């Protein structure tokens, strides 16, 4: 299965919340159990039939590009030892997708990073996938978003109900229902509002199904929250356009792992590891004992 939809993964942030680990490495390369976070995102894209992926990179390009490339000496070494299991795990990331890279240059915000994808994306629809949000492969989201995007010929973004005390960390959406459960029409978007200004507790999570129309808007979007060019602001303009096809939201109720800050990152690793067949049986009893002593 291959679709005429490309994926864009912004990975040019400074990763300041994880210093010093991210001093010489993009935060998207931090391991979640035994795979870099960005590999989960690439796997999620390919599982939804997207095999053309553009990664927007910052100054630490090499780690990322090396990860998705082959390593002949390591592969020869494992082959000579007959270690087929590890060889397969090393080769997995090379064979996943057709991966391209573009530098963001100056880090001027998510909207600016997305704009850097314009030449590669051209006239097709594209998915923007943020590496801080990992979606459990057992609860597919992107497939549903693609189906809604195709059905409505409109932009579709992923939303999730969050505790109102956390809405200031996200883009927040004002919505009205549609005739499809868990699909809403977005009437307004605000980037990281204070709780009293938030239109709802529906937060934008890092999956967007966009059409190229967003590029023209991003070209003239002024810096917003935090002095950065915000994707949320461009989408708000499209949502407010009465002539346009509108912006829709898919409300996700599955398992999402936030790796954006240190505590959430540690939780994500534990949640994923206890569910793994190779690690869970050893980890679960230890974790119970450890927690009982806290
Ligand atoms: C970005 C977006 C925000 C969205 C969030 C999801 O913020 O600007 O609207 O809710 O991703 O993770 P960031 O977390 O990169 O500051």
Image (tube, grey):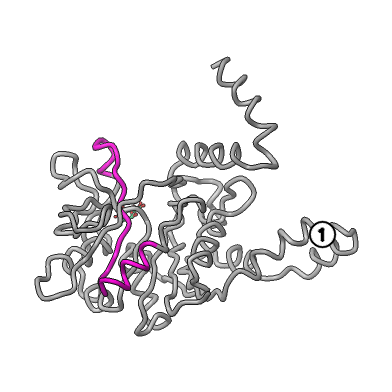
Looking at this rendering, what residue extends furthest in the top direction? Answer: 293
Position of 278 compared to 230: left or right?
A: right
Question: What residue is disc 1 on?
Answer: 84
Q: Residue at x 56, y 76 (%)?
A: 98
Disc 1 element: helix
Position of 86 compared to 53: left or right?
A: right
Q: Residue at x 59, y 22 (%)?
A: 288
Query: Relative to residue 279, is residue 93 depicted above or below?
Result: below
Give coordinates of residue 143: x percent, y percent: 42, 63
Bounds of the magenta segment: 144-168
Position of 212 compared to 27: left or right?
A: left
Looking at this rendering, what residue extends furthest in the left direction? Answer: 242
Q: Is 22 in front, or is 216?
A: 216
Badge 1: few (under 14), some or many (20 or more) residues near its Cα, within 10 Å? Answer: few
Q: Quadrant of the C terminus?
A: top right
Q: Is residue 184 magenta?
A: no
Query: Relative to residue 178, is residue 68 depicted above or below?
Result: below
Q: Residue at x 70, y 42 (%)?
A: 278
Location of residue 292 (image quadrant): top right
Q: Residue at x 18, y 63 (%)?
A: 236
Q: Is 45 in front, or is 56?
A: 45
Give coordinates of residue 111: x percent, y percent: 30, 66
Location of residue 217 (image quadrant): bottom left
């Amino acid at each position: 299965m291959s679709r005429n939809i490309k994926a864009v993964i912004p990975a040019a942030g400074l990763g300041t919340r994880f210093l010093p680990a991210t001093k010489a490495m993009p935060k998207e390369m931090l391991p979640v159990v035994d795979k870099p976070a960005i590999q989960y995102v690439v796997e999620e894209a390919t599982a939804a039939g997207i095999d053309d992926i553009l990664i927007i990179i910052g100054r630490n390009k090499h780690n990322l590009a090396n990860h998705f490339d082959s390593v002949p000496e390591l592969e020869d070494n494992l082959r000579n030892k007959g270690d087929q299991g590890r060889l397969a795990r090393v080769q997995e990331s090379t064979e996943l997708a057709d991966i391209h890279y573009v530098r963001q240059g100056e880090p001027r915000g998510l909207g600016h990073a997305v704009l850097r994808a314009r030449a590669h994306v051209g006239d097709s629809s594209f998915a923007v996938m943020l590496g801080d949000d990992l979606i459990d492969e057992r609860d597919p989201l992107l497939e549903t978003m693609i189906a809604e995007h195709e059905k409505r010929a409109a932009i579709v973004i992923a939303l999730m109900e969050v505790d109102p005390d956390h809405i200031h960390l996200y883009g927040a959406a004002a919505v009205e229902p549609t005739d499809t459960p868990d699909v809403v029409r977005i009437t307004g978007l605000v980037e990281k509002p204070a709780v009293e200004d938030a239109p709802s507790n529906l937060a934008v999570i890092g999956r967007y199904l966009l059409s190229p129309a967003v590029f023209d808007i991003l070209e003239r979007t002024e810096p917003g929250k935090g002095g950065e060019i915000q994707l949320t602001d461009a989408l708000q303009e499209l949502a407010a356009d009465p002539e346009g096809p509108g912006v829709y939201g898919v409300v996700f109720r599955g398992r999402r792992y936030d790796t954006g800050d240190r505590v959430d990152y540690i939780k994500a690793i534990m949640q994923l590891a206890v569910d793994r067949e190779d690690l869970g049986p050893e980890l679960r009893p230890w974790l119970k004992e450890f927690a009982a002593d806290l």
